[in-house]
Amino acid sequence: MNSIVRLLVLCLFVIFSAAGHADEPSPGARRFYAAVFGIVFAENGDVKQLRLLKVVDPRKGNADAEGVEIPQTFVDAVHKMLSSPKYRPKAGAVPADETYTYFFYDPSRPDRADLDPRPRGR
């Protein structure tokens, strides 16, 4: 009987220990954030205005990522990406108002705006 109680206590300890660490990323896991931008395009498709609106922690839904600072190198990378043919609006299709989009931000790679941590289908 004593060994059953010990086993039960050990199992409960393991379960509660694992539950306490469920929100913590694994040590090797990269942490990504979503940087939300407002963009105004000029009539020729150039980026006229780019402003960072907020930084979101996707693991917490739409919650702001407290204490995450977006460096200018990342904003510059986003600007460069939006100026590329892939993202640049075609002539005649330039939105009249500010449009909104997000880019994933990895603090370990602050000069990359082309990151996408979502799993891909095979």
Image (cartoon, rainbow, N blue to C red):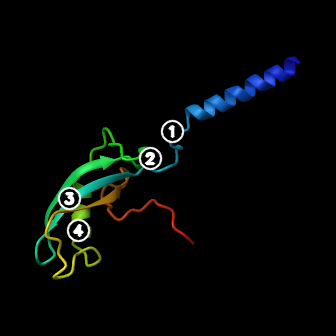
In primary-sequence order, the first of circles 4 and 1 is 1
- On screen, residue 65 above or below 52: above
**Other-residue count near label 2 (Cα within 10 Å), few / some / many at <14 / 14–19 / ≥20:** few
- On screen, residue 72 above or below 46: above
Cβ atoms at labels 4 and 2 below 8 Å apart: no
**Left or right: where 80 falls relative to 108:** left
- Residue carrying label 2: 59
**Other-residue count near label 1 (Cα within 10 Å), few / some / many at <14 / 14–19 / ≥20:** few
**Other-residue count near label 3 (Cα within 10 Å), few / some / many at <14 / 14–19 / ≥20:** some
Q: Quadrant of the C terminus?
A: bottom right
Residue 43 position by quadrant: bottom left
Cβ atoms at labels 1 and 2 below 8 Å apart: yes
Residue 79 drawn at (x, y percent): 21, 65
SS category of the residue bearing label 3: strand
Q: Give the spatial CA distance, label 4 vs label 1.
A: 34 Å
Q: Nearer the viewer, residue 10 or 89?
A: 89
- Residue carrying label 3: 38
* Residue at the bottom extreme, as displayed: 91
- Residue carrying label 4: 80
SS category of the residue bearing label 2: helix
**Left or right: where 106 falls relative to 54:** right
Residue 109 position by quadrant: bottom left
- Residue carrying label 1: 23
Q: Nearer the viewer, residue 90 or 72?
A: 90
The mark closer to the camera, 3 or 4, is 3
In primary-sequence order, the first of circles 4 and 2 is 2
**Left or right: where 36 falls relative to 120:** left
- Residue type (three-letter) at the residue carrying disc 3: Gly
Q: Which residue is rendered at x = 31% and y = 59% of the image?
A: 102
SS category of the residue bearing label 4: helix
